[in-house]
Image (cartoon, rainbow, N blue to C red):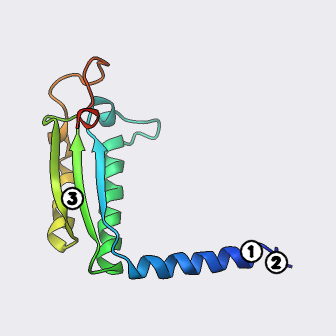
Amino acid sequence: MASPWASKIDEEDEEFVDETKTRDIHTLVLIDARTPMFERNAENEVFIENAIQVVLYLLKTTIFMSDSRCVGLTFFGGKESVEEVISLDLVDSQMIRTVKNLLNDYEKLAPTVDTTDRSVKCPLREA
């Protein structure tokens, strides 16, 4: 027997899906590129690589879901204070290629100074 609230959740989910289909949703992804993001976790994965893989998944799903959703990608705390990799724009195959290339060569984002020092201010707080 189904719970009395189960049908209400299903109705709300359908309303949410309908609402997101009719609205343009724009996503700007900000990824921390400070030193700790280049370390390996217990499963021997690199944090920044995992973050870039999520962006790649987002781009691939967005390109099939909608032709009017925009995605952008910006790194902060790396070699540049703030580095915009992809401007907020409609998703296309070039964006996906750019992120795939970045996934294969993410070391170029590594900071040149030790950013684990708490005296280094986060550029997003200063914006």
Residue 6 left/right relative to 47: right
Measured along the vertical axis of the image, is residue 43 above or below residue 61?
above
Q: Secondary structure at mark 3?
A: helix
Q: Toward the viewer: 26 or 95?
A: 26
Mark 1 lies on residue: 6
* Percent x, y of residue 7: 73, 79
Spatial separation of the CA atoms under disc 1 and disc 3: 39 Å
Name which residue lies at 32% across and 80% down: 66
Pointer 2 residue: 2
Q: Whole-percent x and y of residue 76?
A: 23, 40
Q: Is residue 47 above or below residue 27?
A: above
Instruction: Determine whether, in the image, residue 112 is placed left or right of residue 61.
Output: left
Amino acid carrying mark 1 in the image: Ala
Q: Residue most toward the front?
A: 127
Q: Residues within 10 Å of mark 2 (few under 14, many from 20)?
A: few
Disc 1: CA contacts within 10 A as few (<14), some (14-19) or many (>=20): few
Q: Which amino acid does the dot numbered 2 rest on?
A: Ala
Three-letter amino acid code of the residue under disc 3: Val
Picture coordinates of residue 41, whole percent (x, y): 42, 36
Comparing labels 3 and 2, the label whose residue is closer to the camera: 2
Q: Nearer the viewer, residue 27 or 59?
A: 27
Q: Nearer the viewer, mark 1 or mark 3?
A: 1
Callout 2: SS: loop
**Res 99 label:** 3
Residues marked 2 and 1 touching at CB (< 8 Å): yes
Q: Nearer the viewer, residue 89 or 78?
A: 89
Position above or below: 125 against 67: above
